[in-house]
Image (tube, rainbow, N blue to C red):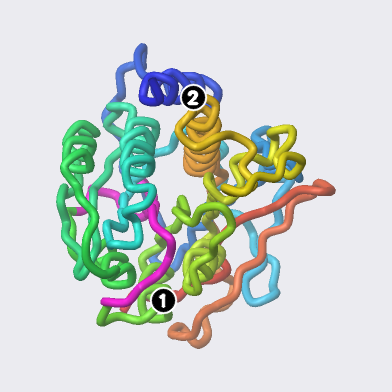
Amino acid sequence: MRGRFLAASVAVALAVFGVGLAGQRPQAPPSPIRVHVNEVVVPVTVTDQQGRFVSNLTEKDFKIFDQGVEQKIAYFSAERNQPVVIGFLIDQSNAQRLHWKTFQSAAQDLVLALMPEDPRFSGYLIAYSNQPELLVNTTHDPSEIVEQIRKMKPGGGAALFDAIYMACTNRQLVEGEPIEPRRVIVIIGDGHDNASSKTLNEVLELAQRNLVTIHAMSTVSFSFYAEEESNLLKLARETGGRVEYPLDNPYEDVAGYLSKPSDAGNYALTVGTGGYAAQIARAIFNSIAALQGEITTQYILRYVPTSTDEPRIFRQLRVEVALPNVIVRHRKGYYPYAP
C-alpha cells in the first residue's frame, strides 16, 4: 500500500516540477559547451520563506560577488531539468536498522524521481558501511540502481567521508562534466562516520574542487539527533545543497500530537496503523519532492573572475537576488584550480 502511495505521489511531483515519465521530446545531439579555462560555474536555487521555488527570475535579478567584488555574468540559464549526474550514497550501517525498510523504499523512489529515463540524467550508487562500495557505476538506467538498493542490507560501521571521496575520484565520467552535466551527490543517512580514513574537511575541499553539490535526506527520526548529524549540514551548506528531515517530526500537521498523553509514549498516531504509515509516507514523499525540485529547478551563472591572484586560495562567493524575503542557496566558494 505504501509503495503504491509513494509511486503515485512521485508521479504527481514529476508533473509539478516538470520532469515527465513519458512524452519526452527527442533529444538533438548536444552542441559543444565552450567554457573559459578560468570560468566559474555557480548553480543557484531561490525559494521563498515557505520553501517554494522561485523560477521566473532573469539575469538582471542576480548579482554575483567574488571575494567581495561584483562580477559580470557571462552566461545565465534558467532552463529546468538541465543535465546532471547524481551520486546516490546510502548509509547501510547498523545505525540504520530501525527504519531501514522505510528509507530503502524511499531511496528507490528518489532514484526514479531524479532519473526519468532521459539521457540528460545519469546516476551511480555507492553503499557505505565499514567501507564504501561502488555498486552501480555511472548509468542512464535507473532500474540498475533500484535493483541494487533492493538487495542492500544494513550492518557494520559508517564510512561516509570515504564514500564521498570515492564519488569524487573513482567512477566513470560523463562527457562535459562538471559544466554540463552538473555534479550532484544525494546522501541518505544520518551523517555519522566511524570508519573513514578521510576527514570531513578533506572531502569537503575535494567536493568543492570538483564542483559537486551535496544534498541529503537525513535518517534521523523524531528529533533524536546524532552527534555527527551536523556533518550533513556542513557538507550541504558549503556546497550549495540542502538537507531534508522526513522523520524529524512527521506529526507536525496532525492534530492532537501533544494532547493525548499515553503511558506507552506520546504518539499522535499509533505505530503499526494505517494512519501512522500514511503520515510517514507523506513526510518522505514531501522530502523527495523537495530534493527533486532543488536539483531540477536551478539557475546557472557563469563568469570569468576579474582577478586571478592567489590561484590556490579558496575564494568566497556571494550571490544576491533583487527580491525581498527569499532564500538563496549556492556554494560558498571555489578553488580556481583542481588538485
Chain-order first, disc 2 or disc 1: 1
Say what secondary structure mark 1 lies in. Answer: helix
- Camera-nearest residue between 212 and 104: 104
Q: Where does residue 24 sit, x and y in percent of width and height?
A: 36, 17
Query: Which span of residues is magenta-colored?
Result: 173-195
Query: What residue is shown at x 66% (from left), y 66% (from top)?
Result: 318
Is residue 330 left or right of 188 when viewed as pictured?
right
Name the disc covering residue 205, or none. Answer: 1
Q: Which mark is residue 274?
A: 2
Q: Mark 2 or mark 1: which is in front?
A: 2
Q: Residue at x 38, y 38 (%)?
A: 106
Q: How far from the left and from the top, in percent, is residue 271?
A: 50, 37
Q: Nearer the viewer, residue 222 or 116?
A: 222
Quadrant in which the N terminus appears: top left
Residue 53 among those drawn in magenta: no
Q: Looking at the image, can residue 161 be seen?
A: yes
Would you say 125 lies left or right of 83 here?
left
Helix, strand or loop under label 2: helix
Asked whether 27 or 158 is in front, the reply is 158
